[in-house]
Amino acid sequence: MLGHSRSERFHASYPTSILQNYRTELEYEYGLTRKLAAFTMIVAYFALYFLAAVYVPFSGTISSVVSAIVPRARHVVVGPERIAHHLSTLLVTGQLLSFFREVGARATPWMD
């Protein structure tokens, strides 16, 4: 924080501007890769975490609340089988997408 005035230190964008002020293109690409990996993991695994940590233990309460709000809603039982199926679907889909990205990159080198 040396060399910065008080107004600069307490500006709302100060922490992000310092953290995202990369010296080289390589540092920028490493930072971008870390952010993309983190956000992709959060988005991909949030549904699985929701099923395991929230919906399975409280499925009876959640279904009764949903049934009270939407009378024609059907009750869906969620157990370990659904979580295992969701995880396997997520992993297989990720592998297929990675495969097609790699094959597509090799098949179309002019698109780089």
Image (tube, helix red, strand yellow):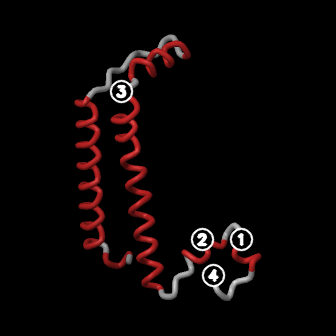
Q: Is residue 42 left or right of residue 13?
A: left
Q: Quadrant of residue 31?
A: bottom left
Quick check: marks 3 and 2 in contact, CB under 8 Å?
no
Q: Counting residues from the N terminus, which is met first, the one under dot 4 or under dot 3? A: 4
Query: In front: mark 2 or mark 1?
Result: 1
On residue 1, which mark appears? 4
Give the residue type at disc 1: Phe
Q: Which residue is mark 2?
A: 16
Distance of mark 4 from mark 2, alpha carbons? 14 Å
Distance of mark 3 from mark 1, alpha carbons? 43 Å
Q: Counting residues from the N terminus, which is met first, the one under dot 3 or under dot 1? A: 1
| Secondary structure category for the residue under label 4 | loop
Q: What is the x, y in percent for residue 43?
A: 42, 50
On residue 10, which mark appears? 1
The quarter of the picture where the C terminus appears is bottom left
Neighbor class of circle 3 (other Cα within 10 Å; few <14, some 14-19, many 20+) is few
Q: Is residue 98 left or right of residue 27?
A: left
Q: Which residue is mark 3?
A: 57
Give the residue type at disc 3: Pro
Neighbor class of circle 2 (other Cα within 10 Å; few <14, some 14-19, many 20+) is few
Quick check: marks 2 and 1 in contact, CB under 8 Å?
no
Neighbor class of circle 1 (other Cα within 10 Å; few <14, some 14-19, many 20+) is few
Query: In front: mark 3 or mark 1?
Result: 1
Q: Quadrant of residue 77?
A: top left
